[in-house]
Image: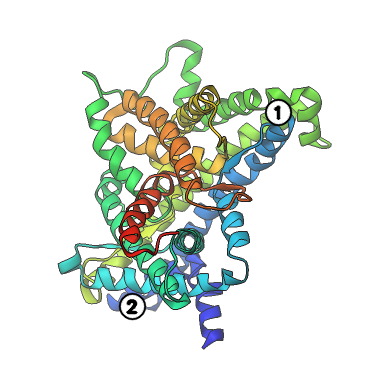
Amino acid sequence: MQSVIDFLVGDLLVTPTILIGILVMIGYMLQKSGAVKTITGTIGAMVGLQLIIFGGGQFAGVFKPITKAVCDATGIQGYIMDSYAMKAASQEALGIRFGWMAYVFLIAFAVNILMVFFGKYTKAKGVFLTGNAGTAHAQAMLWLVIANFALPNNALTVIVAGVLTGIYWAYSTTLAAGVVDEVTEGGGFTVGHNQQIGIWFFGRLAPKLSGKKKVDCEDMKLPGWLAIFNNNVTSVCILMFVFVSAFCAPLGISGIQKLAGDQHWLIYLIMVGIQFSMYMVILLQGVRMLCSELTASFQGIQQKLVPNAIPAIDVAALLPFSPNAATLGFLFCTLGTVLSMGLLLLFHSPIMVLPGFIPLFFSGGPIGVVANKKGGLRAVIICCVLLGMIQTFGTVWAITQLNYPEAVGWSGMFDLSTVWPAVIQALRWIGSIFGITI
């Protein structure tokens, strides 16, 4: 039994490329599309998703050493808003109980599937398929339950954590589905990551911020030499070069040269901008490949097995639908985060949080895309500055619930900095009635 669980949690369910491939294959088989279409469509979808995962991972990989170097150089100590920091903190805190995460994940996945299967009654539609984010949720929620509640036994602890995670997957992905469908113009998927409720929230807020004249970030025609920014590939490259150069300023030329290694420091900064642009192109190609196969094949699953089901995939799939807005969303989310850090310093907060690239880009970028679609440039600016502030102060709130001073950080992404601490806080109030709150 343990070997089966190890395979499911350690290999199959946490490898979204394989999982998506299986679902696409089943969809085409249910439609009786023939062996050739089934095979080519399955492989095409898997390659497309792998391109999305690769492109998204490379964004973080390029920026992570830069963030670490700047933090070391400035001497600012605090908690890091970063998904990997959250994984490290919860794994360290769980210790020998870390293995329970596998059972939490399986329970959550089962709850999610059951809620979608009975969608007629639950109204749930999204099936969470982003395994890497799912395992992070399982271990983080497990730790939050252990840190805040003294439940009668270990089994109940695991069940509570699994059920809470599964309910979150089912309803957060469903809430985001309508907004994602509008943004992607019928892409046939929803988002399963760390900011689904954020997508829904800003999807509702953005139309109210558009102003008298909605300006689409993708339609902006800049005059004179500024017209080079009308090209998405060029604008991403130049803006990221400027941003990274400014971000690295505390390092000085010698510090940047240390990051660059054998490369000249200026060439290194130029290449960072080019790499960001290249990874955006890779993401765009991956989204095109995945969406075409996923939309076509999933009709078979919806018709024959689970009528309400909508696949929930990595949030990076949204970025290519408005590349300019994604870049601006990242920049203004960063601005909101920096402003919030200043406020924490001003009011002598005992908790200081440092920005990680992942919540800035993988929340700021997609929310920028959503805000642009629903409200244009003005909405992108306001929503993403607000996003940066919410994520920063929400991270402070979440960290107060960890009860683990040695923790290095928390995810920082919208849902884990708003919905999750709110749920834990509500459960603490309920638990205090029964005397199970720590």
Residues under numbered marks 2 and 1 in contact, where contact means CB atoms less than 8 Å apart: no
Q: Rounded to the nearest whole Å, what is the CA distance between mark 2 and mark 1?
A: 57 Å
Q: Identity of the amino acid at label 2?
A: Met
User: What residue sits 33% from the left and 38% below the top?
Assistant: 370
Query: Dot 1, crowdedness within 10 Å: few (<14), some or many (≥20)?
Result: few
4 to 412, vertically: above or below? below
Q: Position of residue 427 (x, y in %)?
A: 34, 57
Between 26 and 432, the one lying in front of the other is 432
Image coords of residue 148 (percent x, y): 45, 58
Q: Which residue is mark 2?
A: 29
Question: Quick check: can you spot residue 160?
Answer: yes
354 and 19: which one is in front?
354
Q: Earlier in the sequence, mark 2 or mark 1?
A: 2
Query: What is the x, y in percent for residue 27?
Result: 32, 72
Tell me the amino acid under the disc marked 1.
Answer: Thr
* Residue position marked by numbered label 1 in the rendering: 74
